[in-house]
Amino acid sequence: GRTTYEVDKLFPQLNRLTLVEPSTTFCEWASLLLGSDDAMPDFPAIDRAGSPKWIAPVHRPKALERASERLRIMNETLEGHDPEQGYDLMTCLNVVDRHANPAEVIDSIERYMNDGGLLVLSSPFDFHKESTPDRTKQINNLGDLFSNRPSWSHVGETELYYEYRSHRRSWTRLVAQVVAKCWNTSSSDVIRS
């Protein structure tokens, strides 16, 4: 939800924003945060290991303008998503290291990306055997996902440092690789299924 909010602030001329998320809970919270200025319920915050503390939100951002017209929140996986039309901008943040086969994420994105569309992809490469059991599918550079895909051109790359708190006395710091790629179907023979 946060990325959708930030993209809307940067590009207010966008007429359509679609959030695809497999977690029902995340979709419910995104709907509350992005789609309405109604009061939000208390939300869980990390206090101590094993026991979240429920707190009231403060300094909440305003809902997106014309959210009922512009925003669609789809509670499904990207592979199961079937949009009415393609996308000019897609973000896929910290997903590839939670997928059984990261290359399939790019396959799905290619099916929905408009020619000339921009992809922003990030990962801290925090792979877990529950998400990606086949270690040969795990990568340590997002560029590896594009090595045999000539229709993607490199736009830029950076690293993003962030921390999260698993409980009161434990912080984890991660570094995510962030890449931007442009989809150009005229640069090669591309078959879309």
Image (cartoon, helix red, strand yellow):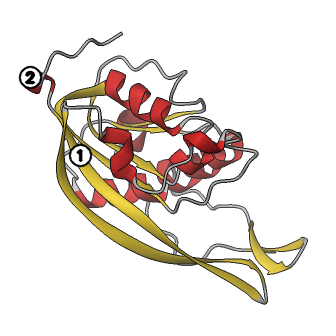
The x, y position of residue 154, in whole percent, is 18, 49
Q: Specify the amino acid type for callout 2.
A: Ser
Dots 1, 2 in contact, CB < 8 A: no
In the image, taking residue 178 as reference, residue 101 lies left or right, namely: right
Nearest the viewer among 13 and 164 is 164
Distance, label 1 to label 2, CA atoms, is: 15 Å
Give neighbour class at mark 2: few <14, some 14-19, many 20+ (Cα, 10 Å): few
Q: Is residue 119 above or below residue 9?
A: above
Query: Which badge, 1 or 2, is on the more N-terminal residue?
Result: 1
Q: Which residue carries the number 1 mark? A: 181
Q: Which residue carries the number 2 mark? A: 186
Nearest the viewer among 10 and 99 is 99
Quick one: SS at disc 2?
helix
- The residue at 64%/48% (across/down) is 26
Q: Is residue 65 visible?
A: no
Quick one: SS at disc 1?
strand
In the image, taking residue 59 as reference, residue 40 lies left or right, namely: right
Q: Is residue 85 above or below residue 16?
A: above
Q: Residue placed farthest to the front in the image? A: 136
Where residue 39 is drawn, which disc sits there? none
Nearest the viewer among 79 and 86 is 79
Q: Quadrant of residue 45?
A: bottom right
- The residue at 56%/47% (across/down) is 138
Q: Residue placed farthest to the bottom in the image? A: 169
Q: Is residue 170 visible?
A: yes
The x, y position of residue 43, in whole percent, is 73, 66
Q: Is residue 152 above or below residue 44?
A: above
The x, y position of residue 40, in whole percent, is 65, 61
Q: Specify the amino acid type for callout 1.
A: Lys
- The residue at 26%/62% (across/down) is 157
In the image, taking residue 50 as reference, residue 103 lies left or right, namely: left
Nearest the viewer among 102 and 137 is 137
